[in-house]
Image (spheres, rainbow, N blue to C red):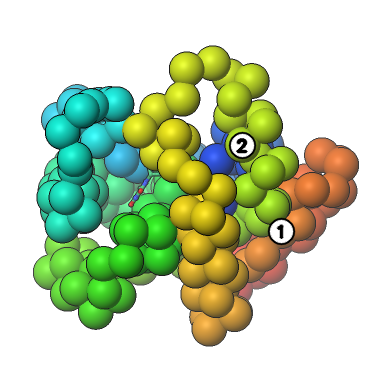
């Protein structure tokens, strides 16, 4: 028995949490057991690494340090939480995964994609998501929402050019892997976003 692994990606404030709750309710209504989790984080140790990563600080955080911390959290999360759940037949829905590392650390910070790929293979072996939903919106839209939530974290403090690079990286990765990586227009009204998501879930269940 092996569950499906779904990851949700997108820039800041694109509505990931609302739509993850929707995905959970859709799947559970069909009798599918789900595990909802997030990155960086998902286990106590990985959540501590998350705090280190998002905290605003005076010291410059070197891109390679950031990259390695992302994968340190991911290794813990994968072995302690994601893989055990999948092998029990649960469907795992993760708020972000390795595509975020390509988008933010490679697209945003400029680390080479091949170095991200090396760590991806090292930490994950051949485990990849079955479906990745990219909730796509122009960074201005999402950042307005993120600002409304209060104090900005170290990533949210970045300039709009950074978020433009993140978005472009996500979109080009989605275009390169259209079978796994589906783009949902997150600027639509919520009911239209959720209609699109429900259709993609039906396709995944049928596959
Ligand atoms: P959040 O959107 O869940 O709050 O994620 C926290 C931040 O971490 C977000 O700004 C994106 C960033 N991030 C990366 O830079 N690389 C990664 O691999 C992941 C998982 C998140």
Give coordinates of residue 160: x percent, y percent.
Answer: 55, 48
Image quadrant of residue 64? bottom left
Image depth: mark 1 or mark 2 in front? 2
- In the image, residue 5 above or below residue 189: below
Q: Ligand 1: which quarter?
A: top left
Q: Residue at x 29, y 26 (%)?
A: 56
Decide which of tag 1 and tag 2 comes sooner along the chain: 2
Percent of width and height locating residue 118: 17, 74
- Most foreground residue, 174 or 91: 174
| Tag 2 residue | 143
Crowd class of label 1 (few under 14; some 14 to 19; many from 20; radius 10 Å): some
Say which quadrant the C terminus sits in. Answer: bottom right
Please say if the residues under marks 1 and 2 sit with CB atoms less than 8 Å apart: no
| Location of mark 1 (residue) | 184
Q: Residue at x 15, y 62 (%)?
A: 123
Q: Residue furthest top?
A: 150
The one of 65 and 173 positioned closer to us in this rendering: 65
Instruction: Please say if 55 is above or below 162.
Output: above
Residue at 26%, 67% in the rendered image: 111
Disc 2 secondary structure class: helix
Dot 2 alpha-carbon crowd within 10 angstroms: few under 14, some 14 to 19, many 20 or more: many
The one nearer the camera, 194 or 183, is: 183
């Amino acid at each position: 028995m092996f569950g499906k692994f779904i990851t949700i990606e997108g820039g800041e404030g694109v509505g990931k949490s609302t739509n993850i709750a929707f995905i959970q309710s859709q799947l559970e209504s069909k009798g599918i057991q789900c595990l909802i989790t997030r990155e960086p984080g998902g286990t106590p140790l990985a959540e501590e690494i998350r705090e280190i990563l998002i905290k605003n600080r005076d010291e410059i955080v070197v891109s390679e340090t950031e990259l390695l911390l992302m994968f340190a959290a991911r290794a813990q999360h994968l072995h302690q939480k994601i893989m055990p759940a999948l092998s029990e037949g649960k469907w795992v829905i993760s708020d972000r995964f390795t595509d975020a590392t390509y988008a933010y650390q490679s697209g945003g910070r400029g680390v080479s994609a091949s170095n991200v790929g090396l760590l991806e293979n090292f930490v994950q072996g051949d485990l990849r998501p079955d479906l990745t939903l990219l909730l796509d919106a122009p960074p201005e839209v999402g950042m307005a929402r993120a600002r409304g939530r209060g104090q900005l974290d170290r990533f949210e403090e970045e300039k709009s050019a950074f978020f433009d690079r993140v978005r472009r990286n996500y979109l080009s990765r989605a275009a390169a892997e259209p079978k796994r990586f589906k783009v949902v227009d997150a600027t639509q009204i919520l009911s239209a976003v959720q209609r699109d998501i429900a259709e993609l879930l039906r396709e995944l269940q049928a596959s």
